Amino acid sequence: MGKKVILRQEKEDLIENYLFKNYRQQQSKTTERLEYQNDFLETLLLTAQDIGCSDIHFEHYEETCRVRFRLDGKLKEHYLIPLEEYPIIVNKIKIKAGLDISEKRLPQDGRITIKVAQQEFDIRVSSLPTLYGEKLVLRILNKDASEIVLEDLGFTDTELATYKESIKNPNGIVLISGPTGSGKTTTLYATLKLLNDTKINILTIEDPIEYTLEGINQVQLKENIGLDFASTLRTFLRQDPDIIMVGEIRDVNTANMAIRAALTGHLVLSTIHTNSAWSTISRLIDMGIPAFLIASTLNVSVAQRLVRKLCPHCKQKIEVSKDVFPSGFDIPDKLTSHYIPRGCNTCHHTGYIGRKAIYEIIPITKDLIANIKGNVLDIGEYLKEHNIHTLKDNALELVIKGTTSVGEAYSLLTD
């Protein structure tokens, strides 16, 4: 009352963004009132599934509490929670996960299995004491691997043919490298789905079991009782396996057991944390694995990353500017324009919808066996001669096609 209103023209996309953000906050207050009901978690899970969320973060700060969803690998705030209601939410989730609600000083881990709308969600719960209260992270593991196929993941035709050829061997090691959250487990399970047969015994040891696949014997890692990767692998060899999948090679004991399994006639699939397909060799050597054993057992080394795909409804085409590329990057002549994210209601104002895997696949040939034994680390010329595309090559191709943005592929375009 008594205030002067000044009208100012604003861009349409910004107005849509304001409306969307305020609508989401208003919606969050309505949803959070459901926490007094028995179905607040079910409602939250259905919302998360509807927008393709993989993790739900509950966070307590000095004056606010919030819920963030991880969409396509990035966190986005979706709900605000009143300070007085936050402890009630946390306790209800901890009770469902079998955690001690009186213990607020130490981290805890638990699990929830819940059925919602004829779907079963398996949720891994992690609590962490922070300055103002407990932080909870819910990892949704409701993934059924029966719909995953290699052809849909992002391989080029040449890469897919090379990869399929390498997994036809009845023995040896297939290693997939990349950081956490790069889709390595998805690729492994698409591979297992292809190899799965009633005539084959497949065993896996994982932490956690992220996918379920009929016909495969899956074991959950439990290090607190001595059920680790190395000891389980040792037991696997007495279980008459044909194919063994190890969730991750973390140490020399696990690596040695994987090598031993491959040498005794088994096909071993696993992941490892390295930056490129060839640096996997150096990582194994640094662990203490003899080069001649690596050379005689490794079938193929794969590196992969996930890049977000631009929203087709709002991406904007602009001319190429050298400033947006990494320093020293040589812009190819055919790249005269590229696309940038804008954000709209369809993509929840992130500018991206979905993700696509890109790969770097190096089959171990006789020439590379000699390089491994000689500890030759530079194989750039070899990759060019054999037309093997690196992560950088494939990332640049997606930028040229307008599938992703320079900002999303930036880290892969650096040398």
Image (cartoon, rainbow, N blue to C red):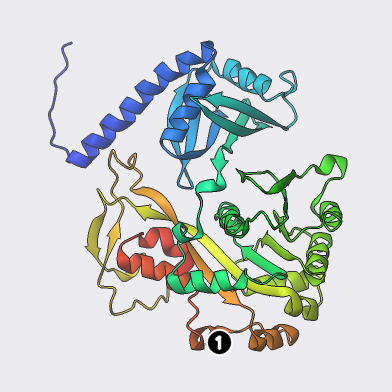
* Residue 305 visible in this rendered orientation of the protein: yes
* Amino acid type assigned to the residue bearing label 1 in the image: Tyr
Residue at image coords 78%, 69%: 265
As drawn, is 367 to the left or to the right of 239? Answer: left
Of 105 and 244, the residue lying toward us: 244
Residue at image coords 48%, 34%: 68
Residue at image coords 51%, 51%: 148
How far across and how far down the image is residue 389, in percent?
A: 48, 76
As drawn, is 371 to the left or to the right of 291? Answer: left
Q: Residue furthest front?
A: 199
As drawn, is 29 to the left or to the right of 213? Answer: left
How far across and how far down the image is residue 312, in percent?
A: 27, 52
Of 50 and 179, the residue lying toward us: 50
The relative height of residue 205 versus residue 322 in the rendered view (above or below) is above
How far across and how far down the image is residue 174, in percent?
A: 66, 67
**How many circles with numbers are drawn on the protein?**
1
Of 303 and 231, the residue lying toward us: 231
Neighbor class of circle 1 (other Cα within 10 Å; few <14, some 14-19, many 20+) is few
The relative height of residue 317 versus residue 106 in the rendered view (above or below) is below
* Residue that mark 1 sits on: 382
Q: Examine the image and state in which quarter residue 393 appears.
A: bottom left
The relative height of residue 382 versus residue 110 in the rendered view (above or below) is below
Classify mark 1: helix, strand or loop: helix
For the N terminus, give its image quadrant: top left
Of 58 and 395, the residue lying toward us: 395
* Residue 325 visible in this rendered orientation of the protein: no
Residue at image coords 64%, 28%: 112
How far across and how far down the image is residue 166, in percent?
A: 61, 72
